[in-house]
Every structure is written in structure tokens, then in C-alpha cells.
Amino acid sequence: MCPTNINQSQGHIEQQQTITGASSFDRYLSYFLIFAFSSGALAHCLPAVLPITQVTTDGLLFVLNGLVLYAIYRANQDKRLFVWLAIAYVFTFIMEALGVATGAIFGEYAYGPTMWFQWLGVPFVIALNWCVLTLACNEVVIRLFSKKAKAEADQSGIKYRISHIAYPLLAGVLTAAYDVLIEPVAIKLDYWQWAAGDIPLQNYLAWAAIAFVISLPLHLLKIRFRSPVLLVYFLAQLFFFVVLNFML
């Protein structure tokens, strides 16, 4: 066998090992996410363990979001993801802080003491959770519409990818729709409360806009973030909130 073939074979083996390792990690992490959100739903329904569950919410969310982000980077090896995350986190946190202080962005609301680690009245984990959820919503949108968008672009001959704008818009709408399920549960568990009692439409419009803004760079700059773990995260957390909407 010539040296070129040997190098190609070795490269192929190393690539296969990397893919296999990544797939195995993603699979086990997916199992863990399903377990975490399923057991979390059960724990929130049991009065005996609810106090402990509420105390550990911050830490658990940091762990889950951190693992998902690690899985994304491990699969894509795109360091720009962390630049995006830092900017998106700061932007989202500032919007939250301004929202709590003024009521002008989302409406009049305040976070409860359930999440301990806060600054300016905003839990540190909240902005991270919104960033990861936005990534997950983008993953879902791409899975649903990528083939159709490509076919339409090929037929029309338009070189500029309309999906660069359409995907962030759809992700923003999906994020706001997801929040419809989050809000009643969060209120009942005292994660946050609305001053007027009712959830204003302004809240959903604001989240759609924020999710659109932080989604836009992902597509315009072609940051690699795709991962099957994001879909599992989206569905497992969706299951969590659907169950608690019925049980609480």
C-alpha cells in the first residue's frame, strides 16, 4: 500500500473514531436530558421534594445548558459559537435587567427568590437558558424548513439566502410560542410574577424580537451550531412544561 493510501486510511479511521465518539456522547447526553426533565417534572409535582427541587434549580439549569453547549461545540468545533454566546448572553441579560427595572420591555414583572443567584433582580441562569432555547428553536426551524427553502431558492435562482432572515424570524416566533407554555408554570412555582397578574402580549412580542436579534448572526455569519442534542433538549423541556401545565 502506498503512503498516500495509508495516510488516507488513517485519516478515515480517525474521522470515524471522532464521529463515533461524538455520536456516543450525544446519545448519552440525550438520555440524561430526557431523564433530567422527566424526573424534574415528577419532582415538581411532589410536595415532599419540591423545596429541594426549587433550591437546586439554578445549579441544574447551569449544568444542563453547559452540557448542551459543550455538545454543540464538540460536534462543530466552531469557536465563534462562544463569541456569539457571550454577546447574546450579555444582550439578553441587559434586556432582562431593563425589563425588571422599567417594565417597558416585557411589562411589569419581578423574579421571585426561587432562583438564588441574581444581579439587578435577574437570575444569572435566565439569560443562558434563553440563549440555549433560542439555539434549540433555530435547530427545529432548520429541520422543518431547510429542504423547502433550498428547493425554492434553486427554482427562483436567487443567490442570496432568504433563509438568513426567514430562519431567525421563525425561530423568534417559535421561542415566543414556547414561552406560552413556560409562563404559567414559572408563575405557579414563583420563578417570576407579573404585576398585573395577567401575562401581557408585550412579553411574547419582546421575546420574539429578542430571539430574532440573537438568531440573526447565527445565519448571517454561518456559525456552526447544529446538533441532534438541541432537538432532544427542545422536546424534553417541552415535555417538562406541558406536564407541569396540567399537573400544577
Image (spheres, rainbow, N blue to C red):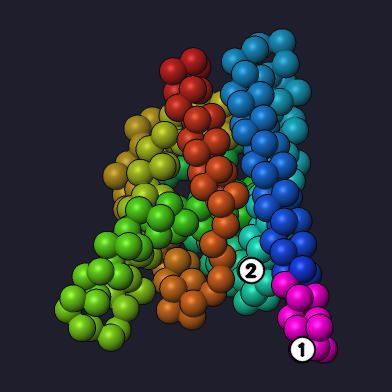
> Which of the numbered marks, if any, corresponds to residue 4?
1
Q: Residue at x 45, y 66 (%)?
A: 215
Q: Name the residue under label 2.
A: 76
Q: Is residue 75 above or below residue 9?
A: above
Q: Which of 84 and 121 is in front in this view?
A: 84
Residue at the outermost bottom position: 3
* Residue type, mark 1 in image: Thr
Distance of label 1 from label 2 (alpha carbons) = 27 Å
Residue 70: say if magenta: no
Q: In this view, does 92 lie above or below 47?
A: below
Q: Which of 102 and 66 is in front in this view?
A: 66
Q: Give the range drawn in magenta.
A: 1-12
Label 1 sits on a secondary structure element that is: helix
Q: In this view, does 78 lie above or below 94?
A: below
Residue 11: say if magenta: yes
Looking at the rendering, which quadrant does residue 114 occupy? Answer: top right
Looking at the rendering, which quadrant does residue 74 occupy? Answer: bottom right
Q: Residue at x 69, y 61 (%)?
A: 19
- Are there few (<14), some (14-19), or many (20+) residues within 10 Å of tag 2? some
